[in-house]
Image (tube, rainbow, N blue to C red):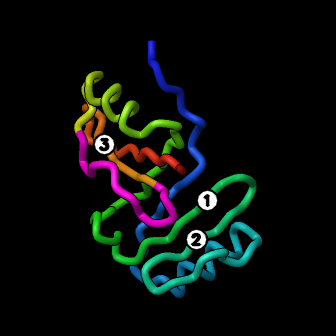
């Protein structure tokens, strides 16, 4: 059915209104300190998952958590899901270190994230 597979959901980003308060809660929940701790993003690694905190929803204006499906070829997967009826919300772009991300919405408006590490 598809020409490019996914590697599963490995990244979930959460918009937060108070980064310092959220950081304490997620550190307690996950049992680990953050690996990245910046004013614009706090990221945790726990049990093979990356959990990110994005103050104010970031430039993409997130209003709810977004799960990111890891894929080997983000452009191919974008083509597949849009051909199947998804709508591109945020085109693929580099967020640093060669990591590409994009988001699409399904027919019900749910946001799905795609992530490719180079």
Say which mark, if any, is on residue 43: 2
Q: Do the residues under discs 2 and 3 have CB atoms within 8 angstroms?
A: no
Q: Do the residues under discs 3 and 1 have CB atoms within 8 angstroms?
A: no
Residue denoted by label 3: 104
Task: Please tell me whether mark 1 sits on a helix, a strand or a loop.
Answer: strand
Q: Image height check: is 13 above or below 80?
A: below
| Label 3 – label 1 distance at C-alpha | 20 Å
Q: Nearer the viewer, residue 44 or 2?
A: 2
Q: Do the residues under discs 1 and 2 have CB atoms within 8 angstroms?
A: yes
Within 10 Å of disc 3 (Cα), the crowding (few <14, some 14-19, many 20+) is many
Task: Please tell me whether mark 3 sits on a helix, a strand or a loop.
Answer: strand
The answer to if 91 sits in the magenta stretch is yes
Residue denoted by label 1: 50
Q: Image height check: is 51 above or below 72?
A: below
Which residues lie in the magenta part?
A: 88-99
Residue 91 at x, y percent in the picture: 27, 49
The answer to if 102 sits in the magenta stretch is no
């Amino acid at each position: 059915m598809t020409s490019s597979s996914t590697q599963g959901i490995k990244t979930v980003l959460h918009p937060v209104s108070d980064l310092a308060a959220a950081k304490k809660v997620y550190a307690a929940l996950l049992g680990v300190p953050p690996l990245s701790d910046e004013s614009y993003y706090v990221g945790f690694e726990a049990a093979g998952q990356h959990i990110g905190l994005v103050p104010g929803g970031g430039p993409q204006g997130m209003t709810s958590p977004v799960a990111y499906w890891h894929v080997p070829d983000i452009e191919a997967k974008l083509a597949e899901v849009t051909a199947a009826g998804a709508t591109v919300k945020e085109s693929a772009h580099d967020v640093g270190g060669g990591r590409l991300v994009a988001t699409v919405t399904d027919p019900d408006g749910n946001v799905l994230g795609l992530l490719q590490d180079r």
